[in-house]
Image (tube, helix red, strand yellow):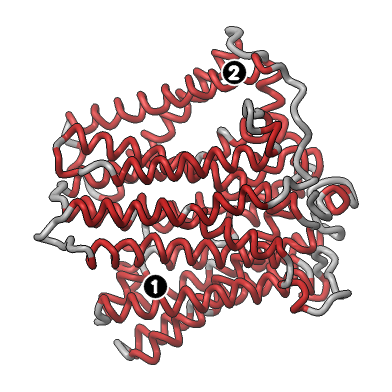
Amino acid sequence: MIGTMRGMRATTAAPWWRVLWDWRVAAMAALGFAAGLPLLLIFSSLSLWLGEAGVERRAVTFFSWAALAYSFKFVWAPLVDRVPLPGLTARLGRRRAWLLLAQLGVVGAMLGMAATDPAAGPAALMRMAAFAVLLGFMSATQDIVIDAYRIEMAAPEQQGVLSAAYIAGYRIGMVVAGAGVLFLAAAWGSSKGAYDYAAWAAAYTVAAVAMGVGLLTTLSVPEPRGAPPDAVTPAGEHARLLGVFLLAVTVFVAVFWAAGAWAQARGWGALGPLPTLGWEALRLALALGAAFGVGALAVRAGLAKPSAAHQTWVEPVLAFFRQHGWADALLLLAVVGLYRISDIVLGVISNVFYQDLGFSKPDIAAAVKTFGVVVSIGGGFLGGLLATRLGVMRALWWGALLSALTNLGFVALALAGPQRPALYAVVAADNLAAGFASAAFVAFLSSLTQVRFTAVQYAIFSSLMTLLPKALGGYSGGMVDALGYPGFFVLTTLLGVPVLALVTWAGRRLPAAPDGGAPGDRATAAASPK
């Protein structure tokens, strides 16, 4: 079955170790580190900071809005693809100019959070929320540019190992922002019941300094040859497109906030989990509908030229369907949307499972946050190397199989009870499979993009890949209540069966691997950087 699938042409001329001995691998690891740093500074680390500062739990959840930037980065990705930055683009090139701007924004947001004591009152808490949203926005923008840079800096057959390097750096960045920042805040004197603002401020400042790794990399690496040429659109039209985007964002925030205030005034916060989930989905849909509707009306009213708006936001999507045809494009999007469903749905409740089984927090931290991260990095490089040597589709198939089968290890752990060797064995298998599948999948996503629309198409794919799995993961607690842990883990394994079928179908239906353009197009355009 696997032999019938065709991936991208494997590279066999050089030994495997020479693939790793490349400056681009080191550069992607460093940029991955810069991309992984901000994430936990918005979520877990910030939640603990706010908790120690005495902020009530309901207010802490307000900061989850900062995560919306990661889910909807495809909306402003077209501007990153097309709009040059005055003074920076001419000096650094399109990709590095935007990357430098995004990284400076990340550093500024981190320092702004470090300069704000959330315990100082409502005004300070609102400033902290604003800086958190800014951090999410600039971090998501950095992700857009790094993804485009990685795809354009090397040929398609090299994307596997570059993806592995990026994921390795990303996970190390998350460890620094999570465990590292928490360790520093505790070591410098802040704890639950003994809050010390200076300790948290210093820890976040150290994280901002660590972003120097990304800044130095951006200033050192060359602009990729595969980057799209500068747009010929007049500068005034760029400003008008940006105005449409800012207007749509303003409407989104206003409608989202107003709907939340309306529901709170009617006491809807006491609804059960499923009605609340349904309302939040409706609230998000209303805000998005209003934003897109106002944006379309603004274009019709002449705020921006319809042709420019079409080329910026519509053409990248139409180009993907024109390239592959509607049937194959929908098949590819189905693979993108479902590939990670097995491990993401399980991952939502995995830490709760460990606790329910009887493992202590130190046990979980040592096994999952330390040992598991190291194993996942190894799995990522294994997946990247196999994608490089065997082809993306074969590596993709094996990643889907391993992701599904390793879920059965959780069944064995649930039946065995809190046995530490069993915990480490399950965590090792799960993280090895997750790292392998992640590297293969990122290489697959990279292969789908076209040079003209690298940033926006990849942003769409990366947003789509978590949409359904995360939505389904919200029901994982109810599934466990109904099925028990062993039944739930068997179900997550079975979720991988349709994925295997889709990958097999895609490999048979697409005799030539998707390379992001006409045959040889991207391999020629992105074979090597300047």
Which amino acid, by three-letter code, is at mark 2? Answer: Ala
- Which residue corresponds to mark 2? 239
Secondary structure, mark 1, is helix
- Seen in the picture, residue 332 relative to 188 is either above or below; the reply is above
Residue 311 in the image: state x and y as whole percent.
71, 26
Near mark 2 (Cα within 10 A), the count class, few <14, some 14-19 or many ≥20, is some
Q: Is residue 353 left or right of residue 39?
A: left
Quarter of the image containing the N terminus? bottom right
At 70% from the left edge and 65% from the top edge, which residue is drawn?
A: 160
Secondary structure, mark 2, is helix
- Seen in the picture, residue 344 relative to 268 is either above or below; the reply is below
Which amino acid, by three-letter code, is at mark 1? Answer: Lys
Residue 439 in the image: state x and y as whole percent.
63, 66
Marked residue nearer the N-terminal end (2 or 1): 2
Q: Quadrant of residue 8?
A: bottom right
At 31% from the left edge and 57% from the top edge, which residue is drawn?
A: 203
Residue in front for this viewpoint, 361 or 24: 24
Residue 510 in the image: state x and y as whole percent.
82, 57
- Which residue corresponds to mark 1? 369
> Are discs 2 and 1 less than 8 Å apart at CB?
no
At 75% from the left edge and 60% from the top edge, which residue is drawn?
A: 506
Q: Which is more foreground, mark 2 or mark 1?
A: 2
